[in-house]
Image: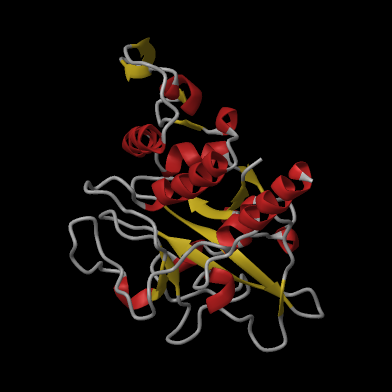
């Protein structure tokens, strides 16, 4: 009985969706239905992202209203930090890292720096620190969330759209687009958006929700394609900043 109870509790928390989240706030467009996702996947994690109250402004790390605020459909209730670090690619890596950390899949948390250096979380959690493009053991083992966030800030400082674009794999069939896929163009500056939910109609045509951060670092925001309409598609260029990247040729995915 103890085992059954433990499993029941685990399933409850693993499938918990905040009362105000991506999946609860945004209904699919008329004629579309939300694409089902498996519990425990990155797609399910993105659908369950908690949101700040309706009407919240997107703010930069310094508290100022962000330049992209007019494109806000919702603000993800996740920290932005006190420094100008969590920009566009960083937000994607933050969400991926948070998901893997929540699953205790620590060995899979790893990102390349622009230099090519592989920065993996287990090295950092085991007391190694980045010095001169190599790991040096200087601290004690610590897998706490505080240390995880210090690791992520290190990643934000040395990684970016050029390195993330190389890490991600091209989506060979855009018709199979799913939550967790990324539209990205590496550069200085580059930009990227992450797909956080997908809906399709009876013709298997897809529309999707996008999230981003920007420069300077700001809240992760769910974007609106047009005033009062949050869903995007690849068959029409959006008028938002970098909307030209929402095309099949820029679509990548995590392995």
Please tell me in which quadrant of the rendered image residue 149 appears: top left
x, y percent for residue 170? 65, 46
Colouring style: secondary structure
In the displayed structure, 161 sits above or below 210; it is above
Please tell me in which quadrant of the rendered image residue 44 appears: bottom right
86 left or right, relative to 178: left
Residue at the far top in the pictured view: 137
Residue at the far front in the pictured view: 1
x, y percent for residue 5? 73, 49
Q: Residue visible at 39% across and 57% down?
A: 78
Please tell me in which quadrant of the rendered image residue 203 appears: bottom right
In the displayed structure, 76 sits above or below 142; it is below
Q: Residue visible at 39% across and 52% down?
A: 88
Q: Nearer the viewer, residue 171 or 133?
A: 133
x, y percent for residue 64? 18, 65
Q: Residue visible at 22% across and 48% down?
A: 82
Q: Nearer the viewer, residue 123 or 110?
A: 123
Q: How many labels sit on residues?
A: 0
Would residue 224 be seen by someone viewing this image from the given angle? yes
Q: Nearer the viewer, residue 240 or 155?
A: 155
Q: Quadrant of the C terminus?
A: top right
Would residue 117 be seen by someone viewing this image from the given angle? no
Q: Residue visible at 50% across and 52% down?
A: 184
121 left or right, relative to 232: left
x, y percent for residue 153? 33, 38
């Amino acid at each position: 009985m103890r085992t059954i109870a433990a499993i029941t509790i685990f399933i409850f928390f693993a499938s918990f969706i905040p009362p105000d989240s991506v999946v609860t706030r945004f209904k699919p467009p008329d004629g579309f239905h939300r694409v089902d996702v498996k519990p425990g996947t990155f797609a399910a994690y993105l659908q369950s992202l908690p949101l700040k109250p309706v009407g919240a402004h997107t703010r930069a790390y310094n508290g100022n209203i962000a330049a992209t605020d007019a494109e806000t459909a919702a603000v993800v209730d996740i920290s932005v930090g006190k420094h100008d670090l969590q920009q566009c690619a960083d937000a994607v890596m933050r969400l991926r890292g948070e998901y893997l950390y929540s699953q205790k899949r620590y060995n899979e948390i790893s990102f390349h720096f622009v230099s090519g250096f592989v920065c993996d979380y287990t090295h950092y959690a085991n007391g190694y620190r980045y010095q001169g493009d190599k790991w040096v053991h200087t601290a004690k083992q610590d897998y706490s969330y505080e240390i995880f966030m210090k690791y992520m800030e290190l990643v934000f400082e040395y990684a970016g759209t050029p390195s993330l674009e190389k890490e991600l794999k091209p989506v060979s069939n855009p018709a199979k687009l799913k939550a967790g896929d990324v539209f990205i163009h590496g550069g200085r500056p580059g930009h990227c958006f992450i797909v956080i939910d997908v809906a399709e109609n009876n013709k298997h045509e897809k529309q999707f929700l996008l999230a981003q951060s920007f420069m300077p670092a700001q809240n992760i925001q769910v974007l609106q394609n047009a005033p009062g309409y949050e869903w995007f598609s690849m068959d029409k260029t959006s008028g938002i900043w970098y909307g030209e990247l929402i095309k099949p040729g820029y679509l990548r995915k995590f392995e």
